[in-house]
Image: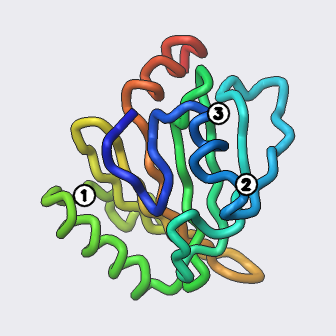
Amino acid sequence: MLEEEIEGFCLGETFNGFKERVGLSVAWTEIPGSPYDRRGKMIAVTGTPSGSREIEMSRLAFFEDRLMEVVFYYRRNTFSQLETLRDQIVEKYGVEPTSPDGTTEMAYKTYRFTLEEMSVTIRRITKKPKAELYVQYQHKELLKRLKEKTGR
């Protein structure tokens, strides 16, 4: 398990550890999975255990019974919010993101941060009826094992 809590979630923690720690402090439900999805248990959470008012919903993915991925969907989904989140992550981790140039991204903008134990991706997608802005945190070791298992 990674030591850092991200909005009240701990990448690498077990599902039972998550249930015991978070309990009923936030509403969560299991998302029915596709038979083709090998990530394991998927959970939708209203908000976050940290109580952040900026995050509308969180989605968790478990692999080998450990929290592999957390995705935060933001209420405010403007381009300025995207840039604010980017600046916060640069300041917090001291790492500059990589980003595709404007020729490949037309309806969305992506920033990727590579850290020692996790990767962070910020993406804003322009779509109707409203744009979507999310930040995805992935546990690198668990993601590597998933890719080895699935061959992707």
Look at mark 3 in the image and give the residue it sits on.
16
Left-right relation of 11 to 26: left
Q: Position of residue 115 (x, y in %)?
A: 24, 44
Colour mode of the rendering: rainbow
Q: Position of residue 132 (x, y in %)?
A: 61, 72
Measured Cα–Cα span from mark 1 to mark 2: 27 Å
**Which residue is painted at 56% across and 85% down in the image?**
76
Q: Position of residue 139 (x, y in %)?
A: 42, 36
| Label 3 vs 2, first from the N-terminus | 3
Q: Amino acid at mark 1?
A: Pro
| Label 3 vs 1, first from the N-terminus | 3
Please state which of residues 135 and 54 is positioned toward the viewer in this rendering.
54
**Disc sitting over residue 44 in the figure:** 2
Given this view, does label 3 or label 1 mark the residue nearer the observer? 3
**Which residue is painted at 63% across and 34% down in the image?**
15
Tell me the quarter of the image containing the N terminus: top left
The image shows a total of numbered marks equal to 3
Secondary structure under the numbered disc 3 in the rendered image = helix
Q: Is residue 83 visible?
A: yes
Please state which of residues 5 and 60 is positioned toward the viewer in this rendering.
5
